[in-house]
Amino acid sequence: MSDLDEFKATYFDECSELLLELEEQFMAIQDGDRDADRLNAVFRAIHSIKGGGGAFGFDALVRFAHSFETLLDYVRDGRVELTEEVVVLCIRSVDLVADFVNAARTGEVLPAEYGATEKASFDALARGEAAETGGDAPGATDDLDEEFDIDFTPVSVDLDTDTPLSAAAPSAGGATRWLIDFAPYPTLYERANDPLLLFRELALLGRTTVTAKLEALPDLAGFDPFGVYCSWSIELASDKASEDAIREVFEFVDGDCAIAVTRLEALVEDEPASGDDLPSFAELAEAAKAERKFVPTGEPDAEPAVRIAPAISLAASAPAPGAAAESAGAAPRDAEDGTGAGKVPGMQSIRVDLDKVDRVVNMVGELVITQSMLTQQMDDAIRDRYQELVRGIEVLAQTTRGLQDAVMAIRAQPVKSVFSRLPRLVRELAGKTGKKIRLETIGENTEIDKTVIEQLSDPLTHMVRNSADHGIETSEERLARGKPETGTIRLSAEQAGGNILIVVEDDGQGIDRDRVLDLARERGVVGPDQQLTDEQIDNLIFAPGFSTASEVSDISGRGVGMDVVLSNIKKIGGSVHVRSWTGKGTRMTLRLPLTLAVLDVMLVRVAGSPYVVPLSSIVETIQNSRADFGHMPSGGKVLQVRGEYVQVVDLARRFELGSEQDDADRFVVLCEAEGNSKIALVVDDIIGQQQVVIKSLEENFERIDGIAGGTILGDGNVALIVDVQSLKTSNAHQNAA
Amino acid sequence: MRILTVDDSRTILAMLHHTLTNAGFEVLQAENGQIGLDVLKNEEVDVVITDINMPVMDGIEFIRQVRATGKHQSLPILILTTETSQDKRDQGRAAGGTGWIVKPFDPEKLISVINKVVH
């Protein structure tokens, strides 16, 4: 990756954050919060996007952002009123900025007129107000463009400027002499500018002779150590300097000094200006000394003592003249060293590459395994004999757990980053459906593992869409039912034990169970005579390919929504549950693990080897002898449990480990797969429950159908993690074949 | 030579860092004026380059407070901004800014401006 690409990546990264922030701030602004901080924040965000965009030459983006920024600037200082109309324009324009950023990222070229209407509105708004205050309305647009151009004018000394602009051009090859009279004001020094540096800069243009003028130096008695008494006259001989180039040297001190630039006659002798001829600062100082007219009146020996004493007393009693003027301005003088330290907020953070964190997470995982291995090795004999060792290992276990929590906390992020995308979605949906919808969010600061957060965006989007599209009724329907006109979708996140609960709730019409059941029967998801509880019917909406919308809408899509929710959530070890109250609303609850790296599992034995089944997918375990098996005509086996027939998979046979006979001592593990479908796994023995650290099989070996990954147990053995979902799917295929 | 860069944009900080370290400067970074002040409390720097528009503490206030600190009265401070409206730049200078750099900057220009204000 080249440096430039890297900067671009940083820039686009930053843009995403800024766009998110803009979104948030404008939502608050739309809700009536016109806090100055918000207005400043949106201005800054657009300003930053423009600034970075300029660095990479994203001209279309910069042009648009510039107009937007100007408007926001006027809004924050009150020149343009922030009407509802302006807010709406701004919100729409944030989307356009996002499009511009996106186009810049992909290299796509947007049509020239893209965003032109909005840009014109910005300019018009900015111009309209300017007309009232400034009175130079006709030229305002041009001013903006001009200003914009100036943005990109480099500031530096142009060494290639040829001839002076003056009419009397020098003879060919002849150097021109300039006389510069330069008298600094106190402000020049207060801004940390230094005449010596200016002379050095000037010497780059040609050969300089600097003469210090010390006439203004007062007698010692009247000498103010902070006073400015010295001025200079500089003679510059140069064949390339123009008056502009000379004035540019003094650019930073413009207004902080009196300066006069006079052109003298051309030199008779051609003296080439070159860097080697520059006088050293020592020479300059010598020259200044030689020119010095001022001789202290006191005796030379006494001079130092006399000079120091008043200097100290003056410094203590009277502040620098400039500083006094400043304190009258704004900055309180007590904001110096000491008091500043007390106000420093304790938020210090560093940016760390996620890879590095993951490496730590993995190593802590290993540590957890090693620690549990050590603990397992300790039998009673060891405990009796090595009490100190045992105590040490107990402390190690505690510390390891603490370390694990601490490391996981590093990866944790507030769900806010996902939640904050949803207000916009709801706004769009409300616009498209013509419904009135309000989104409430609760617990946005709840923290979840970063990987879980990343996987959460799609499911949440689908769920909120579903609520907006199918749940919330139209305003008329709602009014007819005696409900408030505006429907509410409430999004909340909270931590509950080792899980995070995310709830999407709406006060809409609830799930139409009759229609869901009809459709499910029609599509063969449910048998014709099968009786389902209300809850089971509700959860049918997660079945693959299921859509209850009587018409396929372009919002919730073609029934690919809710089963995607389920599969994404299952992928990260979570579960979804829905409850509905007819006419009152629907509540969908996502239960997610706090972290992905550690999994709660049930350890089982199959053909002499250990396997683990994720605890979250297990419904119950049954002894074979008590299980009610049935046989299908195809030869497959089914388990009958509470009126439901569940496919049975003998893991030993499935993994071709030599099939063992059905045995009353074996166990059936009833698991739930996606879409509320179940599968019964037959295992030889159940060993117990524990936490394991997941290892990828693909990274370390290769993909095996029916296995989700591997783990290392406390005794150092490898156990494979059973992939309930893929077993269910492949079994269905086998049965179908 | 050490330079403190103060900007809330990661992109700008990264570009400054790259350009300045390539030119042999040592670079310190701060995300806003408040953090910049903290850095200056503990570190010696030769030049400060600061943005104007920043959260928490903007560049104007930052410059003002730096100048209010006795030991930094002769520290060159360059204002980094795309802001061409004269008032922002003037505000920065009134607060004690030494000079300015116009964004976007090209590396050579940046170095030449820095050379203008340091010994």
Image (cartoon, rainbow, N blue to C red):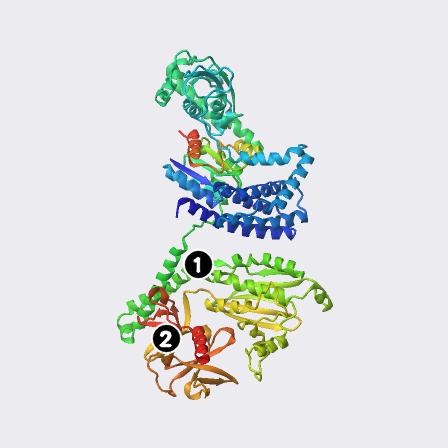
Q: Is residue A196 above or below residue A558?
A: above
Residue type, label 2: Tyr
For residue A411, the mark is 1
Farthest residue, direction top:
A268
Nearest the eye: A365 or A638: A638
Q: Position of residue A283 (x, y in %)?
A: 36, 19
For marks 2 and 1, the one nearer the N-term is 1
User: Is disc 2 placed on a helix, strand or loop?
Assistant: strand
Q: Which residue has dot 2 on it?
A: A611
**Residue at image x 39%, y 77%?**
A688
Q: Is residue A317 above or below residue A233?
A: below
- Residue A691 to residue A197: above or below: below
Residue at point 55% right, 62% down? A461
Near-viewer residue (A288 or A592): A592
Check disc 1 and give the amino acid type: Arg
* Residue A556 circle label: none
Residue A261 x/y as whole percent: 50, 18
Viewer-nearest residue: A291 or A279: A279
Q: Chain of mark 2?
A: A
The 10 Å Cα crowd at callout 1, few under 14, some 14 to 19, many 20 or more, is some
- The image quadrant where one finds the C terminus of chain A is bottom left
Residue B18 falls in image quadrant? top left
Which element carries disc 1, helix, strand or loop? helix
Name the front one of labels 2 and 1: 2
